[in-house]
Image (cartoon, rainbow, N blue to C red):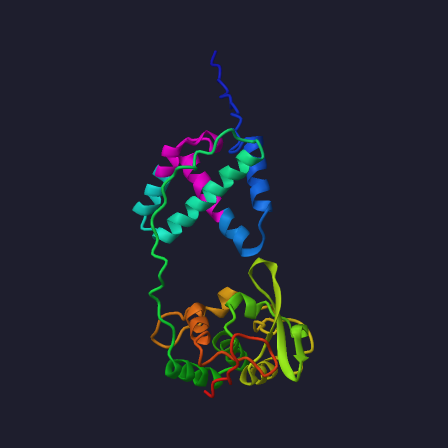
């Protein structure tokens, strides 16, 4: 008589990646930040947690040597010194928060050495002729591109500040066109617009009375990634900080009469 054996299937319980205390520390630390800062810190902690899991180290069982090894691993992968430093700063801030909330006895990142950075910027901004040629080229294209380039180059806005502006934020103060924007850290400021920028924005919004100033062909708000997708023919993508640096040269900063500022200068005639 032949008997057939039925194979049995054993279910193994998967161990959680984080303990309840670690999960509480991660959620509490990230809850203290918003916007792009929170996204950046979440990315840093995600990569560090993945490294810990790969090396079979608990997040609250990390030692100073483990963080040093994580730093060396980033350098071996070709990460820039500024990137490594930011990752280590995020890790140090996370463990400091855990100690302050009495979730951890001691921070293993207190004495971790960070790469030395050269804080002197060697990047060069656009000169007057280059800035003028760029604005002329933008003026020959779509109205939205011209308005965006004018905000970056003549008013010194960040890409995220320009794309986050709404039509309702346009105003008039002392006879000059203004725009209210949200800066880093949630600060709300009102800036005067150069006449050329105001005209470009009027052409860009057309008959629209509300909503974002810059929209995609599908009608959605243009984000900073979409704004930086274009590049000059045969060239590298343009960096918005180059436009901002060019805008902050004394010959191009626009302060309308009656508006407080370090100096009062006429807008550049480009």
Residue 100 vs residue 144, the one in the foreground: 100
Q: Which of 93 and 47 is in front in this view?
A: 93
The image quadrant of residue 205 is bottom right
User: Where does the image place residue 177, in percent across and percent down from the top left?
Assistant: 63, 81
Q: Is residue 63 left or right of residue 94?
A: left
Residue 98: image x %, image y %? Answer: 54, 36
Q: Is the magenta stretch mostly helix, strand or loop?
A: helix
Q: What stretch is highlighted in magenta?
A: 43-68
Return the residue nearer the eye: 178 or 141.
178
Instruction: Note whether 261 is above or below 41 in the view shown.
Output: below
Q: In which quarter of the image is the C terminus?
A: bottom left
Vertically, is 199 above or below 7? below
Residue 223 visible in the shown view: no
Residue pictured at 59% horizontal, 83% vertical: 257
Q: Is residue 86 left or right of residue 187?
A: left
Residue at the limit of the structure toward the bottom, as seen here: 269
Question: In the rendering, at what x and y percent does residue 261 appear?
Answer: 55, 75
Taking the spot 55% from the left edge, 67% from the top edge, the residue there is: 161
Q: Is residue 68 visible?
A: yes
Query: Which residue occupies 35% across, 45% down?
Result: 74
The verdict on residue 47 being magenta is yes
Taking 30 as reference, is 190 above or below it?
Answer: below
């Amino acid at each position: 008589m032949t008997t057939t054996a039925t194979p049995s299937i054993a279910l193994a319980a998967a161990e959680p990646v984080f303990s309840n205390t670690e999960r509480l520390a991660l959620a509490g630390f990230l809850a203290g930040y918003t916007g792009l800062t929170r996204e950046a810190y979440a990315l840093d902690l995600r990569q560090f947690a993945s490294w810990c899991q790969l090396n079979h180290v608990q997040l609250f069982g990390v030692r100073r040597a483990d963080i040093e090894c994580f730093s060396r691993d980033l350098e071996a992968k070709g990460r820039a010194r500024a990137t490594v430093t930011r990752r280590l700063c995020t890790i140090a801030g996370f463990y400091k928060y855990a100690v302050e909330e009495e979730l951890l006895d001691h921070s293993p990142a207190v004495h971790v050495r960070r790469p030395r950075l050269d804080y002197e910027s060697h990047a060069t901004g656009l000169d007057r002729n280059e800035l003028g040629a760029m604005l002329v080229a933008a003026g020959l294209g779509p109205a939205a591109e011209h308005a965006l380039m004018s905000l970056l180059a003549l008013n010194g806005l960040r890409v995220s500040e320009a794309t986050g502006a709404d039509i309702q934020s346009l105003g008039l103060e002392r006879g000059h066109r203004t725009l209210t924007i949200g800066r880093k850290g949630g600060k709300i400021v009102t800036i005067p617009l150069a006449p050329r920028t105001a005209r470009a924005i009027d052409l860009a919004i057309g008959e629209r009375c509300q909503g974002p100033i810059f929209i995609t062909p599908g009608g959605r708000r243009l984000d900073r990634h979409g704004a930086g997708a274009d590049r000059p023919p045969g060239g590298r993508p343009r960096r918005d900080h180059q436009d901002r640096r060019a805008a902050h040269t004394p010959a191009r900063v626009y302060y309308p009469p009656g508006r407080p500022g370090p100096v009062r200068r006429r807008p550049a005639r480009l």
